[in-house]
Image: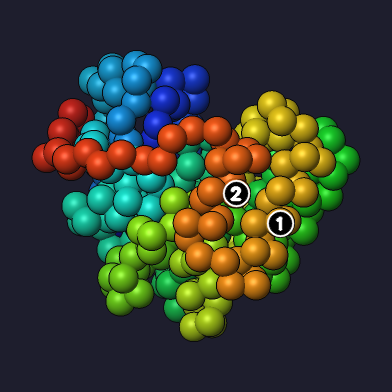
C-alpha cells in the first residue's frame, strides 16, 4: 500500500483541491493513509483538512512537525505504515490512477521515481521545461514532480537530509541516481507555476540556476538557504516546534 505524505505551510488555497484530486484518482485499497504534515500554518489549513476528512473514505492523518519540508516529510515517513512512500507538494496534482502506476513500477523492480510534469501556465519557457521532464536526465528533476520510493530504500538512505531547508528533494534524487534507482513514469502530473507568476519566469529561473550551480560548486546548505531567502522568499529561518502525535481524523 502507498502512504501519501504532503508537507504544508499555509496551503489553505490548494489543500482541499489536492485532497479531492487524490481521493478521486486513486483506489481506496491502495492507499494506507494520506498524512498532512503541518509546519506551523497560521491560516486555516489544518481546519480545512479536518473538515475534508470527516466525509472522506480514506484515512487522513494530520501531524505537526518542525518547519522545513525535509523535516516535515521525514516526520510523515516515520509514522507511515505503507510499503511505498509517496511525497507530494500541496500544489501538485498527480495523474489519474497514480497509485496503480506507482505500484506497477515497484512490482517491475523500480523502487523509486517520479512522474513527468507540466506547469499550469502557457508561458513558452515553462511549457518547454515541462516537456523536458519526460526524459531521465538528472538535471530535469525536482520536487514538484513528486517522489515515490519504497520505505525500505528510504530508510536505507536515511530519509531527507534535514540540514537542507531548500534543495532537499534534489539531495535525495541525487542519491537515487547514484544508485541507479530512479524511473520517470510517462504520465503527466500538473503543478502550480505560482512562484513564477508572482516573481516572473526569468527572474525565478535565473536564481534557481544559480542555486543549482552553487550546489554543484560545493556550496553548503546554509549558503543555498541564505541565497534563496534573499532572492526568492524573504522569510525567517524555520523555528523549532515540537512534533505532535498523529491526529487520525478519518479512518477507512
Front residue of 238/33: it is: 238
**Residue under the point 38% across and 45% down:** 68
Q: Residue lying at the far left in this picture: please name it.
A: 245
- Residue 3's place in the image compared with 121, above or below, is below
For label 1, the residue is 210
In this picture, residue 59 sits left or right of residue 45: left
Q: Is mark 1 on a helix, strand or loop?
A: helix
In this picture, residue 54 sits left or right of residue 19: left
- Residue 208 visible from this viewpoint: yes
- Residue 186 visible from this viewpoint: no
Instruction: Give the crowd class for mark 2: few <14, some 14-19, many >=20 residues within 10 Å.
Output: some
Residues marked 2 and 1 touching at CB (< 8 Å)? yes
Q: Quadrant of the C terminus?
A: top left
Residue 50, image quadrant: top left
For label 2, the residue is 227
Front residue of 231/90: it is: 231
Say which of marks 2 and 1 sits in front: 2
Structure colour scheme = rainbow
Residue 127, image quadrant: top right
- Residue 96's place in the image compared with 83, above or below, is above
Image x and y of residue 239, in percent: 31, 39
Q: How far apart are marks 2 and 1 (CA)?
A: 9 Å
Image x and y of residue 58, in percent: 28, 35
Image x and y of residue 126, in percent: 79, 43
- Residue 228's place in the image compared with 18, above or below, is below
Label placed on residue 25: none
Amino acid at each position: 500500500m502507498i502512504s501519501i505524505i504532503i508537507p504544508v505551510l499555509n496551503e489553505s488555497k490548494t489543500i482541499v483541491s489536492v485532497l479531492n484530486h487524490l481521493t478521486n484518482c486513486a483506489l481506496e485499497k491502495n492507499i494506507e493513509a494520506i498524512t498532512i504534515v503541518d509546519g506551523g500554518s497560521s491560516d486555516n489549513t489544518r481546519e480545512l483538512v479536518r473538515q475534508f476528512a470527516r466525509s472522506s473514505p480514506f484515512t487522513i492523518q494530520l501531524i505537526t512537525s518542525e518547519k522545513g519540508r525535509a523535516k516535515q516529510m521525514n516526520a510523515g515517513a516515520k509514522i507511515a505504515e505503507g510499503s511505498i512512500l509517496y511525497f507530494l507538494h500541496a500544489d501538485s496534482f498527480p495523474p489519474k490512477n497514480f497509485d496503480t502506476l506507482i505500484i506497477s513500477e515497484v512490482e517491475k523492480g523500480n523502487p523509486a521515481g517520479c512522474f513527468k510534469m507540466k506547469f499550469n501556465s502557457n508561458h513558452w519557457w515553462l511549457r518547454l521545461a515541462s516537456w523536458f521532464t519526460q526524459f531521465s536526465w538528472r538535471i530535469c528533476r525536482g520536487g514538484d514532480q513528486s517522489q515515490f520510493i519504497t520505505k525500505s530504500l528510504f530508510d536505507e538512505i536515511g530519509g531527507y537530509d534535514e540540514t537542507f531547508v531548500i534543495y532537499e528533494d534534489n539531495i535525495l534524487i541525487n542519491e537515487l541516481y547514484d544508485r541507479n534507482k530512479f524511473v520517470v513514469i510517462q504520465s503527466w502530473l500538473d503543478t502550480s507555476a505560482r512562484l513564477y507568476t508572482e516573481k516572473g519566469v526569468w527572474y525565478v529561473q535565473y536564481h534557481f540556476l544559480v542555486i543549482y550551480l552553487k550546489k554543484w560548486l560545493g556550496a553548503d546548505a546554509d549558503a543555498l538557504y541564505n541565497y534563496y531567502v534573499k532572492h526568492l522568499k524573504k522569510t525567517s529561518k524555520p523555528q523549532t516546534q515540537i512534533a505532535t502525535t498523529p491526529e487520525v481524523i478519518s479512518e477507512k
